[in-house]
Amino acid sequence: MSISQPGTHSPAPTVPRPARTPAVEATGLRKSFGRLTAVSGLDLTVTPGEVVAFLGPNGAGKSTTLDMILGLSSPDEGRARVLGRSPAAAVRDGAVGAVLQDGGLLGDLTVAETLRAVASMGSGRVDLDDLAALTGLSEVLRRRVSRCSGGERQRLRLALALMPDPEVLVMDEPTAGMDVAARITFWETMRSQTRRGRTVLFATHYLEEASSFADRVVIIAQGRVVADGSVDDVRGLGTGATVTASWPGASEHVLSTALAWCPVSSTVLRTVVRGTHVEIRTTDPDGLARWLLTDTPARNLGVTATSLDEVFTSLTSSGTSPAPSAAKDS
Ligand SMILES: Nc1ncnc2c1ncn2[C@@H]1O[C@H](COP(=O)(O)OP(=O)(O)OP(=O)(O)O)[C@@H](O)[C@H]1O
């Protein structure tokens, strides 16, 4: 699109726009614990306003990475920046808020006392009643933290993280231990936050949570990024789709003999036959379905896309424990 200035027909001069400073930028992050390499050369850039899910199996290095991004630990190599600043400076300026798995709360204080205590330390930029309403804490303000449910405590941690009105919110498995209803409420609150343009980076084990809430999914395994893209991009990494059909008289032998004549047989990845039920995993579901309907007795076809769970398992299944590092002993 070109824009003309009033009274002229010449195009407006192009004013170079400064590149946006990434909300989070991790470059070559590496962290070992003794011989164990927890994070192994990880690069990650999150642009402002993006909602990024950080997924990986147990021990993949998610918490270790988030800790370095928050300045809670230092990388052995590489560096992390938040809004162009060191993590420590970003935390000090209230530019980043964190919801951590076991962030300390004092059990003897009530929810209201906790909010007031933290606000009095000077980081509060928002009205506490509004904050309590936003995070669904209004009804439990007088409850002692030790009596709060796991979900209520997480919402309290979220309220504390939002107190300085941070541009970037980093959350480590924020809904761990919550039941389905609490999880839905939590993400509804988060949606209102991201609509305001807040950047969110969160670690989770729940693929559905990632796919329904994030713009982008970054999957890590053994301290490295193994997939990075939109939910659809990541799903697309899965090999193919499964075509199901009922096939009277089917058997492994009948199917493999028929497939020898199938024009797209080279796209078949796996077959399963159970009675008359046939399942064929293929990279060309349309071609295979066409063949089944025209050249075989198969009927009642169904096609299912590869699920995110399947992609996740195949991307991260080459061992879930971090690689031992010969590099250092600490
Ligand atoms: N302080 C530490 N000392 C020694 N080993 C550690 C330390 N912190 C983490 N690790 C190890 O580093 C690896 C990565 O741990 P991390 O907590 O980052 O994984 P994660 O992806 O967050 O796992 P989970 O999903 O189970 O929380 C694990 O093997 C863990 O035991």
Image: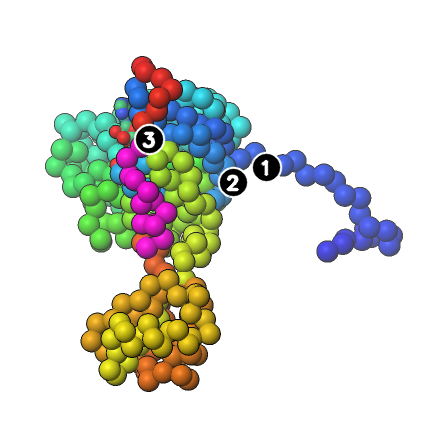
**Secondary structure of the residue carrying numbered label 1:** loop
Residue type at numbered disc 2: Thr
| Quadrant of res 304 | bottom left
Q: In the rendered image, is residue 171 in sight?
A: no
Q: Answer yes or no: do the residues labelled 1 and 3 have beta carbons within 8 Å?
A: no
Distance of label 2 from label 1 (alpha carbons): 8 Å
In the image, is residue 164 above or below residue 258? above
Q: Quadrant of the C terminus?
A: top left
If you read the primary sequence from the N terminus, does the residue marked by circle 2 or circle 3 appear first? 2
Q: Residue at x 31, y 74 (%)?
A: 255
User: Residue 47, which numbered label?
Assistant: 2
Numbered label tally: 3
The residue positioned 16% from the left and 41% from the top of the image is: 149
In the rendered view, tell whether residue 235 sits above or below residue 276: above
Amino acid on which the number 1 mark rests in the picture: Arg
In which quadrant of this rendering is ligand 1 seen? top left
Would you name the residue on which mark 3 appears? Answer: 323
Ligand 1 under 8 Å from disc 3 Cβ = no
Task: Quadrant for residue 62, please give it.
Answer: top left
Provide the secondary structure element on which disc 2 rests.
loop
Q: Which residue is mark 1?
A: 20
Judged by depth in the image, the label closer to the viewer, 1 or 3, is 3
Magenta residues, start to end: 310-322
Along the line of sight, the residue nearer the viewer: 31 or 63: 31
Kind of residue indicated by mark 3: Ala
User: Crowding at label 3, few (<14), some or many (≥20) Cα neighbours within 10 Å?
Assistant: some
State the image coordinates of residue 181 (x, y, percent, origin top left): 22, 53
- Crowding near pointer 1: few (<14 within 10 Å), some, many (20+)? few
